[in-house]
Amino acid sequence: MKRPTIPDLADAAGVSVSTVNRVLNQAESVREPTRERVLRAAEEIGFYGLGTIEHAVRSTQTTHRLGVLLLRGVRVFYRILGEAIADAAATHPGANIDLTMEFLDDLAPEKVAAHILSLGERNEAIAIVAPQHPLVADAIDTVIDKGVAVVSLIGPLSARGNISFVGLDNWKVGRTAAWAFDKMVREPGKIGILVGSHRLRNQEMNESGFRSYFREHNSEFTLLEPLATYESSAVAREHVEKLLTEHPDLCGLYVSGGGITGAIAALRAMPKRDDFVTVGYELFDDTRAALIDGTLSLVISHPLERFARETVATLMKSKASGPDGGARRVTFDFDIHTPESV
């Protein structure tokens, strides 16, 4: 096949040959939408000078310094989410993004606060997953006062300043999980509940929605007090083993927070019961396998690609409008997986 030429690229982009030449040699003299159109056309037709065009277009773009702080890097969900956000930043249209991605293993409030302050010093807008705590709120306000926009991910955060939010409607998530138990459990009984931390507001809202459903629709279930896993699989396994031992009449387990791999391990170590229902979060290799073998009955998860795109878009909008631009709330539908859908 004949190698695409500059006239071919001009036809594909709907511009003149001189415009293509200016994108190649004087990109700053061409309007940004036109530069992007030429770049997209070059990618589509396999133009031989694609690398040159990419360099020319990127060199005219403002660099945006964005930071993202996620929880434990050893957790598969956060690693996958971090990769998705990095991909979304690299492909965000019309922007050159310098992304700082960090993971926080120590969830002590003073450590979280210090990390937020450090990330805020180095970036123009930051997105964070963090527990709610006065020290954390004070660090967020310090960052906002310096002109850095703050976006909370997964769970909303409160401070004096405006904080945007990107994530699921957590109250609705909890009610959906409760609906699943109501419809799948044969005989109402006790349900154990695991949360990662009582200070992670998304999980508190999950639990609130979970309990509100049963108050409204089926009071025959007994909801045990939630047990905190501190986002640790080992702690989650211990909790589940204790629940199964102390409550032989347990009919289900709701894993609202971190540590689901530990919960899965504990359930697999016990004799399998066909009448036992377990609902957990996020679809990855371990939870997919647990759905297939029947250890998990249902998984609710974030649509990661959309979550990542919305995160980057909200960071960019928040940076552009500044700390006084008002808080944005971006929610989207969650995915539901069953053993028959994976």
Image: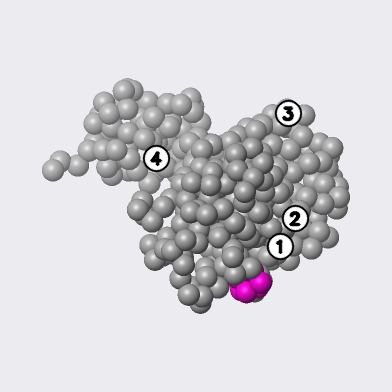
What type is the residue that disc 1 sits on?
Answer: Ala
Which of the two residues, 262 or 86, is positioned nearer the viewer here?
262
In three-dimensional space, the C-alpha distance between marks 2 and 1, rounded to whole angstroms, equals: 7 Å
Residue located beneath label 3 in the image? 326
Where 246 falls versus 152 (above or below)?
below
Going from N to C along the chain, the mark reached first, 4 or 3, is 4
Crowding around mark 4 (Cα neighbors within 10 Å: few <14, some 14 to 19, many 20+) is: many
Residue 228 is labelled as 1
Compare marks 2 and 4 and give the one earlier in the sequence.
Answer: 4
Provide the secondary structure element on which disc 1 rests.
strand
Is 203 left, or right, of 306 in this rendering?
Answer: right
Please, what is the three-letter code of the amino acid marked with disc 4? Ile
Circle 3 packing at 10 Å, graded few (<14), some (14-19), many (20+), is: some
Cα separation between marks 4 and 3: 37 Å
Q: Which of marks 2 and 4 is in front?
A: 2
Looking at the image, which residue sits at the far bottom?
269
- Name the residue located 79 percent from the left edge and 63 percent from the top edge: 108
